[in-house]
Amino acid sequence: MSTLPDRITSEPSKFGGRPCIRGLRIRVIDVLGLLAAGLSQAEVLAELPDLESEDISAALNYAASRIDHPLIAAE
């Protein structure tokens, strides 16, 4: 399986540096949005034919790694 840096890229010239899939013009948030809307992985792959199943896994892993941080509450 490819690592995140192989699958998730960020380029200032594409979508203002937002994370994309393999340098394509497919943003991670677009993949996550389709999944959140209830599409299956097969439906996402049909909707975005340049996408590979490993890209979906990478998008989910990327999102999980970005939200896994402690919150410090101010008192």
Image: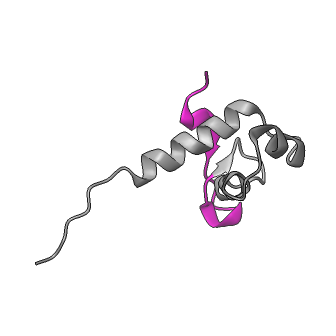
Q: Tell me where residue 72 appears, x and y as whole percent.
A: 20, 65
Q: Tell me where residue 22 appears, x and y as whole percent.
A: 70, 41
Left or right: residue 4 versus residue 72 is right
Left or right: residue 69 versus residue 45 is left
Whether the magenta-drawn stretch holds residue 2 is answered as yes
Q: Residue at x 74, y 55 (%)?
A: 34
Whether the magenta-drawn stretch holds residue 48 is answered as no
Q: Tell me where residue 24 appears, x and y as whole percent.
A: 77, 48
Residue sitting farthest toward the bottom: 75
Q: Residue at x 77, y 50 (%)?
A: 39
Q: Is residue 39 above or below residue 22?
A: below
Classify the position of the C terminus by image quarter. Answer: bottom left
Q: Residue at x 71, y 60 (%)?
A: 14
Magenta part of the chain: 1-19
Q: Nearer the viewer, residue 54 or 33?
A: 33
Q: Is residue 71 above or below residue 60?
A: below
Residue 60, quarter of the rendered image: top right
Residue 49, quarter of the rendered image: top right
Residue sitting farthest toward the top: 1
Left or right: residue 4 versus residue 69 is right
